Image (cartoon, rainbow, N blue to C red):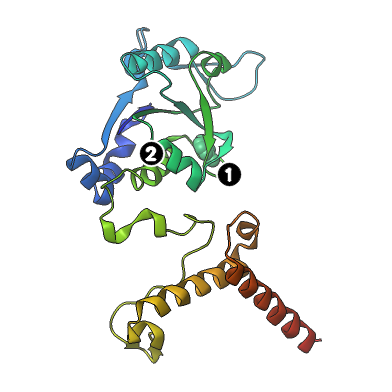
Amino acid sequence: MRIDILTLFPGMFEGPMTESMLWKARDRHLLDLRLHDIRDYSTSKHRAVDDTPYGGGGGMVMKPDVVTVAVEAVLNGAPPDTPVILMTPQGRLFSHEIAVSLARQQQVIILCGHYEGIDERVNALVVTDEISIGDYVLTGGELAAMVVVDAVARHIPGVLGAEGGADRDSHADGILEGPQYTRPPVFRGLSVPQVLQDGNHDTIKRWRRELGLRRTWLRRPDLLLKASLTEDEQYLLATFADEDARKSNASK
Ligand code: ADE
């Protein structure tokens, strides 16, 4: 898979894109990650990329001529329907589902906004999608783009070994992952649950699912509304609700 990132600050990507899983993905030619400096597409003497906004107000706006030409240069030769994603707090909220669907693309182009924003005509002309990573405002789209690249790369076949399959992640089926343990079996008086030490795979699988379900119930009940649950799991949820009701009655 190829991901092109258009940014005013290519240096920001140095660390995250040259370490750990992303580096391995690039090294194994599973991820072709290319950075483009938007400033290279400015034709003005001082390589200007922004200008004051029409109608006043503070800040600067990224110029449509520079940004559009930069995106078109990268689009040149890309497969038809290549998504051009603008990172912006005004976009749709990024999710596991979006990461999975982007990982199925041959190529994705990500545009990092900066300053007060990008001239709206860039959206009309070349942007096909706008993505936000959360309801807060960052100083630019770079960190958001890194989040998207990392989450997408985990779903490119071969990037995670068979052992670390992304299909077992929290959120993969709408349920959070349960707790994890490694050696030693007892640390500062806290033991690894006996069921894990016993090593029965079926029992462990059921136990993990139950604890994941319980954790989701406690921390992110909103996720349960869209999770697909078996009848047994729905029964378990009902028992959690019963337990809660009993506890709250007891404390009255
Ligand atoms: N740029 C600034 N804030 C952002 C956010 N929350 N998500 C994506 N891009 C952004």
User: Which residue occupies 38% across, 85% down?
Assistant: 192
Please provide percent x and percent y for residue 177: 46, 65
On the question of residue 193 being in view, the answer is no
Front in this rendered view, residue 47 or 73: 73
User: Which residue occupies 35% across, 20% down?
Assistant: 79
- Judge the density around disc 2: few (<14), some (14-19), many (≥20) Cα neighbours within 10 Å: many
On screen, residue 247 versus residue 85, left or right, reads right
Residue type beneath disc 1: Tyr
Please provide percent x and percent y for residue 94: 52, 42
Q: Is mark 1 within 8 Å of ligand 1?
A: yes
In the rendered view of the protein, which quadrant contains the N terminus? Answer: top left
On screen, residue 227 versus residue 180, left or right, reads right
Dot label at residue 161: none
Is 104 above or below relative to 167? above
Q: CA distance from mark 1 to mark 2?
A: 25 Å
Which residue, as the protein is rendered here, is positioned at the far bottom?
189
On screen, residue 92 versus residue 103, left or right, reads right
Please provide percent x and percent y for residue 184: 28, 84
Which residue, as the protein is rendered here, is positioned at the far right?
252
Q: Earlier in the sequence, mark 1 or mark 2?
A: 2
Dot label at residue 103: 2
Please provide percent x and percent y for residue 10: 32, 31
Is 4 above or below relative to 153? above
Is 231 above or below relative to 1? below
On the question of residue 206 being in view, the answer is yes
User: Which residue occupies 24% across, 39% down?
Assistant: 30
Q: Quadrant of residue 123?
A: top right
Callout 2 secondary element:
helix
Q: Which residue is labeled 1 in the image?
A: 136
Mark whose residue sits in front, 1 or 2: 2
Callout 1 secondary element:
loop
